[in-house]
Image (spheres, rainbow, N blue to C red):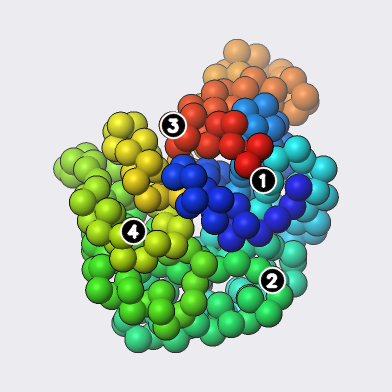
Amino acid sequence: MLTTGKAILDVANEHSFAVPAFNISDWAMFQGIVEISEETDAPLIVAIHPDEVRHIGADLIPAIAARAHRSSVPIAIHWDHGADFAQMLQAFQYGFTSVMIDGSLKPFEENIAITKQVTEAAHVLGVSVEGELGTIGGNDSYAEAGAAEIIYTDPDDAVTFVEQTGVDSLAIAIGTFHGFYPKDLKPELKLDLLKEIKGRLGIPLVLHGGSGNPDDEIREAARIGINKINISTDIKVAYHDKMREVLGTDSKLREPNAIQPECIRAMQVVAAHKIQLFGAEGKGSLY
């Protein structure tokens, strides 16, 4: 069933679990993620970054929506890390049911202004909105460009931001990193900060990054307040590492039907682990 991010995350918020937002970069990855979500009866957010939109092409979005409509679990199609209002208009036109506007590197008042503008437009169309406050840093193209370090979310600013923008969910910075975690930094979530922000806001909270953070920290974060966790690096590493392995065994392989099935299964093993870790397994029955 195709639905909105808000419809999915409000239930997760009520029942204290996190929904995985898996970034997909091709049709095979998308189908594999939907299949493992259905197998585990887990709600799903299909995240597509602007770079990925350019890669797969806008014409594939209606096919993704059609498959979501037929799914036995609720699915939202989410524009990940939108940079400006023009991109949000594209997302609305293409049929995304959820968008993220990332103004986290802008001055606070500018972040509020652009997020409010997007929220007002999206809500007219029934599209849900995720904002971001604080930065998590990163070392890949999916990071907030220019954010070299973590700037933790301030609880007072978070209250003001949500009140003035009307966002449906908020991405916060509590100690994660886009891509692989830097070797000179120790992965560690500020769970006390998460508890404070959750207690003051009450709305669904989002965690970006997390590939290098210990499972027990991620599990606890999902239990006490995080309701959406973005996963990109982990599933892509599994998918493409297996593809390198398969191609390395036979230089004559050329047909996707012979190459991709093992790659999809490797990705699904990682995805199933995340679904279980976040507490999303079996939660499709709540919708």
Would you name the residue on which mark 4 appears?
198
Q: Quadrant of residue 250?
A: top right
Quote the CA–CA distance across marks 4 and 3. Answer: 20 Å
User: What amino acid is labelled 3 in the image?
Assistant: Leu
| Residue 240 horizontal/vertical position (percent) | 55, 31
241, 102: nearer the viewer: 102
In percent of the image, x 74 and y 20: which residue is there? 258
Label 2: element kind: loop
Of badges 4 and 3, the one in the foreground is: 4
User: Would you call the spot at circle 1 few (<14 residues within 10 Å), some (14-19), or many (20 or more)?
Assistant: few
Q: Split into 4 quadrants, where in the image is the C terminus?
A: top right
Looking at the image, is mark 3 or mark 1 earlier in the sequence?
Answer: 3
Looking at the image, is mark 2 or mark 3 earlier in the sequence?
Answer: 2
Label 4: element kind: helix
Looking at the image, is mark 2 or mark 4 earlier in the sequence?
Answer: 2
Looking at the image, is mark 4 or mark 3 earlier in the sequence?
Answer: 4
User: What amino acid is labelled 1 in the image?
Assistant: Tyr
Of badges 3 and 1, the one in the foreground is: 1
Would you name the residue on which mark 1 appears?
287
Of badges 1 and 2, the one in the foreground is: 1
Would you name the residue on which mark 3 appears?
277
Would you name the residue on which mark 2 appears?
126
